[in-house]
């Protein structure tokens, strides 16, 4: 069993969100596909492509355990189930994985090459928006493809129609208020500036607030704040995506990311010799909180 400390209350809250909150950007279609990124010769990058749906947390967990060496996740998703995204995000942070999102390309040819490079099957998935944002921010090192301008967007979640129909106005307002608190706590735990909590709440679900590249570089790119001192000690002053200045330093940072992920994986997956690793990621409660 993973012990997440103060984040346990976020997990319980996310389970509550499952029945009442949805992030509605994603269009109908097949469930997300998980695969090893063909652009990574080390086979340590997992591609998550498509709509986020209930059950994806278990699928992602199984994929990571079966692989035994995932250190990065390439996210190509229009969004989907917010509660599922929060659970996956908590898993990503606990396993100290890096996250990558698609970047803007100058031409359609460049975009096609990027799709092919990562083995993406649907051009519509070449972005990370809505609930996908919640997984992205969980990475301990966050970047855009080829260090370009990200295709990263946010907007407010909404009540699932079936749940909204059963709730009175007062209950609906209470539910929305609880969801806002969960989002604020989650963003805080993931080292996201408070302004994005406010903006997620302010942007209508039918609109999209795109993250500008200057915002991405200042607020998201590179190592999360709590790891920067460690990386600076090991690799020197240019410890994030903006300040990187030498190939040697980039290699050092890559090794730090990999070492952190490998150590985190070993800490939570333990199995006797010759046996398959047991599933130790049962971090969601079995029922809704009162």
Image (cartoon, rainbow, N blue to C red):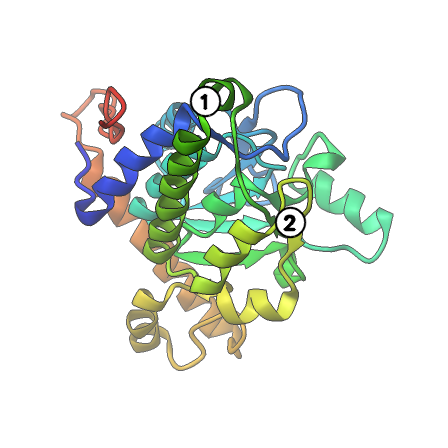
**Dot 1: few (<14), some (14–19), or many (≥20) neighbours within 10 Å?**
some
- 59 lies left or right of 119: left
Residue at x 61% of width, y 50% of height: 203
- In depth, the one of 145 and 36 nearer the eye is 145
Question: How far from the left and from the top, in percent, is residue 204?
Answer: 63, 45
Foreground mark, 1 or 2? 1
Q: Secondary structure at mark 2?
A: loop
Q: CA distance from mark 1 to mark 2?
A: 23 Å
Q: Secondary structure at mark 1?
A: loop
Question: How far from the left and from the top, in percent, is residue 86?
Answer: 40, 39
Q: Which residue is mark 2?
A: 102
Q: Which residue is mark 1?
A: 54
Which quarter of the figure has residue 123? top right
Residue at x 23% of width, y 26% of height: 285
Question: How far from the left and from the top, in percent, is residue 130?
Answer: 57, 42
- In depth, the one of 263 and 5 nearer the eye is 5
């Amino acid at each position: 069993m993973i012990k997440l400390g103060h984040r346990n209350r976020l997990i319980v809250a996310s389970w509550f969100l499952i029945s009442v909150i949805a992030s509605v950007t994603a269009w109908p279609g097949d469930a997300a596909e998980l695969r090893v990124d063909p652009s990574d010769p080390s086979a340590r990058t997992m591609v998550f492509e498509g709509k986020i749906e209930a059950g994806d947390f278990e699928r992602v967990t199984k994929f990571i355990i079966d692989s035994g060496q995932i250190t990065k996740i390439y996210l190509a998703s229009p969004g989907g189930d917010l509660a599922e995204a929060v659970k996956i995000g908590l898993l990503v942070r606990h396993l100290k994985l890096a996250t990558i999102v698609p970047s803007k390309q100058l031409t359609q040819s460049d975009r096609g090459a990027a799709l092919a490079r990562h083995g993406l099957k649907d051009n519509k998935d070449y972005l990370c928006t809505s609930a996908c944002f919640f997984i992205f921010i969980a990475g301990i090192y966050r970047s855009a493809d080829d260090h370009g301008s990200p295709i990263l967007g946010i907007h407010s979640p909404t009540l699932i129609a079936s749940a909204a129909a059963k709730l009175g106005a007062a209950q609906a307002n209470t539910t929305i208020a609880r969801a806002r608190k969960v989002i604020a706590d989650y963003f805080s735990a993931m080292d996201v500036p408070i302004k994005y909590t406010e903006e997620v709440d302010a942007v209508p679900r039918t609109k999209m607030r795109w993250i500008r590249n200057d915002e991405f570089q200042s607020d998201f790119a590179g190592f999360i704040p709590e790891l920067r001192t460690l990386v600076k000690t090991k690799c020197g002053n240019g410890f994030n995506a903006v300040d990187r200045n030498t190939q040697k330093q980039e290699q050092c940072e890559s090794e730090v990311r990999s070492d952190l992920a490998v150590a985190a994986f070993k800490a939570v997956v333990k199995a006797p010799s010759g046996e398959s690793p047991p599933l130790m990621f049962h971090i969601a409660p079995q029922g809704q909180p009162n």
